[in-house]
Each structure stands twice: as C-alpha cells, then as structure tokens.
Image (tube, rainbow, N blue to C red):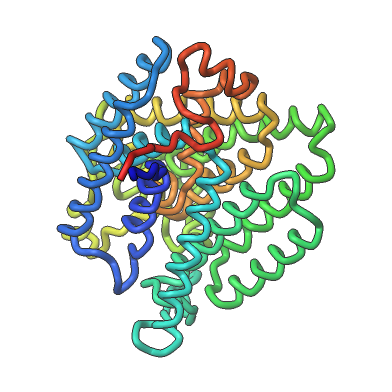
Amino acid sequence: MAKSIKINISFIYFTLLTLYFGFVNTPFQFSKQIQNALLGIMVVIFLFWLLRQNYTGRDIVWLIFLFLFAGITAWKTNVSLLIDVMSAIVFSRSQRSTIFKLIFWERIAINIFRSIFSLNGVIQNKVQVAKSGLYVTGYGLGFDSPNNLAVEIGMLILLYVCIKESSITFKNILVIIIITLATYRLTLSRTFIGLMTVAILLLIGIKYFGKLKSFVNLYKFVGVISLAIGFIISIGIPYVMNLGIGNLDQLFDLLNQLTSNRFLHASRVMLHYPITLFGGIGDFDILDSIYKYSIVDDSYIHLLYGFGIVGTIIFVILYTSTIITLIRNKKLYWVMPIIIFIMWGMSEGVLYSLHWNFSILLWGVILRKNYSSVDGKNLKKKGLISHNAKADFNYTTSV
C-alpha cells in the first residue's frame, strides 16, 4: 500500500545552506568544487520549490526585481547575493521561527564537532592576533581567527533571541551575559564585547519597555538610521583620510590604532579602485603588490565595490523596508540582529553574506508582509497558498 511521506523542502534547502557556510574559515572548509556542487543542488531545490508556489502580481514584481539584482552581482562578482535572495524568498513562505531553530541547532552541532577536534589538538586552537599594534593570543577553537569564533557565537546568541522573542526571561539574559563574558575571555574580541553589550541593552529595553510608544519610536529611528551611520563611518572616514586634511591626522591615527588599521586599508581601496554603478570588484589584489597587504574587513567597502552604487542602494532599500515592516508588525526582537550586524559590518566582513548574517533572511518579510494578519483559511481562499500552513509548505509524495 502506498504511504504518504511529507518532505519539508525548506528544511532541506536550509540544511544545505548550513553545510555550505558552516565550515568556512576552518580546516574543514569544503573545496571550491564541493561548494559549487552544494550550490548547484540548492539552486535545483529552490527552482523546484519556486515552481510549486502561487503568486500575486506583487510577488512576481518583487521576484523579478530581486533576481535582476542578484543575477547582475553574481555575474560580475560572486554568488553571495544570489544565495541571499534565494534564501530570503524561501524564508518568506516558511515557518520562520522553525527555520531559525533549524539553523541554530545545526550550527550548534557543527560547532561542537569542530571544537572537539580543536580541543584534542587535531586542528588549531590558539591563534595570535594583532590588537592595537600588539600581538595577543586568543582561542579560535578551530577557526583561523578568534574574531571568527566571536562572530559565530554572537550569531548564535542573536538567533536564540529571535527564537525566544517575548518568552525570553531574565535568567536567559543572565546566561547570555555569562556566555558573552566567557567568549570575550577566549577570543579577546573588543568588537564582540562592545556589540554584544549593545545587544543586551537593546534586549533589556525591548523586554521591559517594548510596549512604550516612545521606546518603539526611538527603536524604529535607531534601526532606520543605523545603516546610514554605518556607511558614513565606513565610507566617509576613509574618503576624508584620502583628502589629506592635516589637522585630522592625529584623530585618524587614533582611530586606526583602535581598529587595527581598518580605516587605513579601506582608504587604500578608495585610492586605487574606482567606484562603479554595478560593482564587480571582488578582491583587492593591487593593494598586495603595493602595500604587501590586501585584507579589507570592512563590509561596506566590499558592498560598495562588489555590488556597485546601484546594488548598494537596493541593499539599503531592502534592509530599511525590512526594519520598518518588522516594527509595524511588532517583531522588535527580530530588528535587534539587523542593527547589530549593521554595526558589526564596520569592522568585519559579515554584512552582505548569510555565512553569519542570518538577518538577511528577514528580507522575506517584505514579500509576505501583508499576510501576517490573514489566517490560513483566507489565504487558501485567495489562492495564495495551496498547502496546510502548519505543515510549512510540505511536499507530499507517495512511496
């Protein structure tokens, strides 16, 4: 007798996504060939999933817009944005909290696996890094840099907050504080401790003042302007540095000491590379031949040169619309990771890729922002979904 089996396509897709990014910057990182194979399978699964959905005219316009944006960037630079767009689209029609839980536990499993090998001495553990001109020893637990471990743990904490939302307790917050302090002790990442302090303060604010109109308005204002502030600092300071204004030299020297010369490296990029409409610059090899150093950690520089002026504007529109939509739907806890990753992008290359910045998935709320107030039965009547909403668009087959 044939038996019905439910296969959750979105679960399969996001599991592959976790595998694609989960081992990056470790000795277990997949070869380019395996990564391309995983990406190919993800694209096939995505297209199969996409063709089974029902769409309104508004959905179709958004899909065309997003794929044009992602396609140009993939052709000129890399596939990061294509993965971002595909994932946000799948997320838009999935059970969002369940997807967050899936990613959280799969990344936990990968971290346990990597840490076991690191603590047993099979792969690296301690790593020397430069902090304000001095070399200190931090723990990477298998990552090639302690800063990467710090971002990984920060990502997991923010994911946990998105999963718990209003059910988060004061005890949960205390545990987050303890994990934050322990992570700083391991990694010595100043960016991590600073941003997680901001995250904890925002979390306390949402938990205990989230129903106050004045707090919500201030929170929305901070969320909307945070991206502009990120660009002003990350693009504006290197630009002014290149103007050679003498009376600001001491200030720039201090900023570079505090940020391990991040602004200096960004200013060199702006000095030697043109900013174009559609980007296409994925690396900065010229700097290596001139300065013997070409690593640029600033996400905004990579975004501007990789996606171009047009792509950067679209990126800003997507994120700003997402923040406004989430606040209107009272998803204040989900805005917090966006603000934190926007700030983190000023010192690490985390903003434009789902490797760590899972808040990119929240672009999906723009596609489905009008559905939150409509129950499943009305959606079925309107032809917007064709499956049980509780089943998260499960694919049913017979064997």
Q: Is residue 59 visible?
A: yes
Q: Quadrant of the C terminus?
A: top left
Which residue lies at the image location 58% right of the left edge and 47% below the top edge?
340
| Residue 89 at x, y percent in the picture | 40, 32
Which residue lies at the image location 23% right of the left edge and 30% below the top edge?
71
Q: Quadrant of the N terminus?
A: top left
**In terms of image quadrants, where is residue 311?**
top left
- Residue sitting farthest toward the bottom: 121
359 versus 177 height, above or below: above
| Residue 103 at x, y percent in the picture | 48, 53
Closer-to-camera residue (46/181):
46
Which residue lies at the image location 39% right of the left edge and 17% below the top edge?
55
Closer-to-camera residue (399/142):
399
Which residue lies at the image location 68% right of the left edge and 37% below the top edge?
332
Q: Is residue 300 visible?
A: no
| Residue 276 at x, y percent in the picture | 25, 30
Left or right for 60, reference 292: right
**In terms of image quadrants, where is residue 295?**
bottom left
Q: How many marks?
A: 0
| Residue 57 at x, y percent in the picture | 39, 10
Closer-to-camera residue (233/277):
277
Left or right for 144, reference 273: right
114 versus 273 height, above or below: below
**In terms of image quadrants, where is residue 235?**
top left
Left or right for 26, reference 131: left
398 versus 184 height, above or below: above
142 versus 224 height, above or below: below
